[in-house]
Image (spheres, helix red, strand yellow):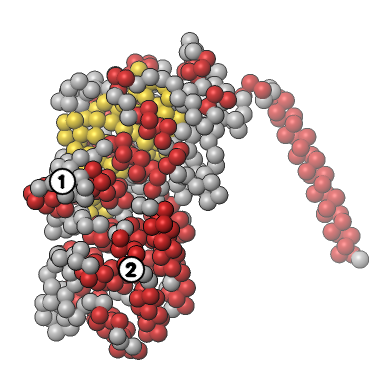
Amino acid sequence: MSTSSKSNNSDIVQKLWNLCDVLRDDGINYSDYVTELVLLLFIKMVHENTEAGLLNKHTLPEGCRWSDLSDKDGLNLLDDYKRILLTLSTGKDSEGNTLHTDPLILAIYADAQTRLREPRHLKQLIKSLDSIDWFSAQKDGLGDLYEGLLEKNANETKSGAGQYFTPRALIDSMVRVINPQAGEVIQDPAAGTAGFLIAADSYIKAQTDDHFDLDAKQVTFQKNHAFVGVELVPSTRRLALMNCLLHGMEGDDEGVVHLGNSLGQVGAALPKADIILANPPFGTSKGGDASITRDDLTYPTNNKQLAFLQHIYRNLKPGGRAAVVLPDNVLFEQNNDGNSIRRDLMNKCNLHTILRLPTGIFYAAGVKTNVLFFTKGSESDTRQEENCTTSTWVYDLRTNMPNFGKRTPFGEQYLKPFEAVYNLPLTERKEGEWSFNAEEVEAEKSAVNQGVDDKLTCSRWRCFSREYIRDSKGDSLDISWLKDANSVDAATLGTPEELAGEAMTELKGALADLEVLAASLAGGVKG
């Protein structure tokens, strides 16, 4: 996408986001803003795509189109909008007559209701959507515009799913190095708003001249069978289905993203995939819809990420590739069968690469994450089922990196050095990569650096044998060797007695200050 196109799209996203003021005036909560807006926005985008000849299937039925809203006012307008949502949701009109049976539209508008109470606010939204330059937005695809709105929502709200929204730069980098190809089945068992699946689709379209290099049968496969996701939350799945359809991804009768729990029977029934890309939700299973009810996972656990990890490496075809975002605790946790699951992963798959991500790139403060890259089978035999990992390469993009956030946004420039070393064939990889002033970073004075060339101890790119991980790390994958400039060296802290003495002196000083303050306050009251 050109710079001017990006600018135009971000301008439109900001205009759409500004409509939240209208919704707030109508008493709609900030957290419900995107859901409320997209119910109307999707009708408008289907209209624009149909007008441009880009949408032949999954058009909206007569009486439920943008033209049925745009020329109305007052209570008639609000009543008609409620009627349209009911028809799109149920497929029937108020008298029970069937108006449409499109399973994808039924899924997108399942249980859809507006919370708008004032017709003038609905009219204002319609006028605002009509005033946008859709022709300019059309050139880059309305899907990109819609996705920009979802990202804006995640940035602004920092709650719910937004706190774990995967940064676009990371998604795109993971897709580039996994290198998906036309004809492959690509899965995301924790799909969210379908960011990974859409990025993979865009990557394949770029490699195939927007599918023009494919025959009719291959194009049908890409539209209907290449991508499958699962999402637990109905409102998030609604956003995902809209997102996919606006990107020309139709999926099967349930759409690209199915409603359900990948850690339940829906996940157990998923067909094996060539590629799995995922950022599973953080946390533990506490019962309810999100509970772990799979009976086919070898190692029972109430840690969701460890359960998702088992699903992913079990669900790959021989030679299948995975890239999965996981928090630090999955790499070292001893409880919940953590060690057994990591051993099983390295036994059944070639865990060839770990990327240690910087802190601050997720919207949940302080979350430390990694990307695990692995292939089912060994490097030499995709059908090998044991001892598949012989060595694991680790790229440290965390130590002594900037504090990322709004002031220092995380962009693809920070991932390019990693991609450069990752993309070499495994047999040609060499240790040593010193981007982002790595040579100035002090090496840890620990066993991991003993007997290692001084220059390599400051490299961001190191290789560790399976034997080292087993014998020296106890099958923990929490491997680091660079010293953070902000870390405290325990050797320079003094004895426990000295530390306790310093703390006592500081506490006595603070207590004396409080006594002086209390006395002065008492004197003020007497006066």
Q: How far from the left and from the top, in percent, is residue 322?
A: 27, 36
Apparent side of residue 393 relative to residue 522 in the rendered image (left or right): left
| Residue assigned mark 2 | 134
Q: Is residue 483 visible?
A: no
Mark 2 or mark 1: which comes first in sequence?
A: 2
Q: Amino acid at mark 2?
A: Trp
Task: Tell me where residue 387 appears, x and y as whole percent.
Answer: 24, 20
**The label number, if any, that marks residue 213 in the structure image:** 1
Residue plotted at (60% across, 33% down): 486
Residue shown at the point (13%, 77%) measured from the top left:
99
Name the side, left or right, on which 497 lies relative to 363: right
Residue at horizontal 43 percent and vertical 68 percent from the top: 15
Report helix, strand or loop for mark 1: loop
In the rendered image, residue 369, in percent from the top left (x then y), is placed at 42, 38
Judge by depth and name the residue closer to the eye, 6 or 314.
6
In-front residue for pair 394/126? 126
Could you tell me the amino acid type at mark 1?
A: Asp
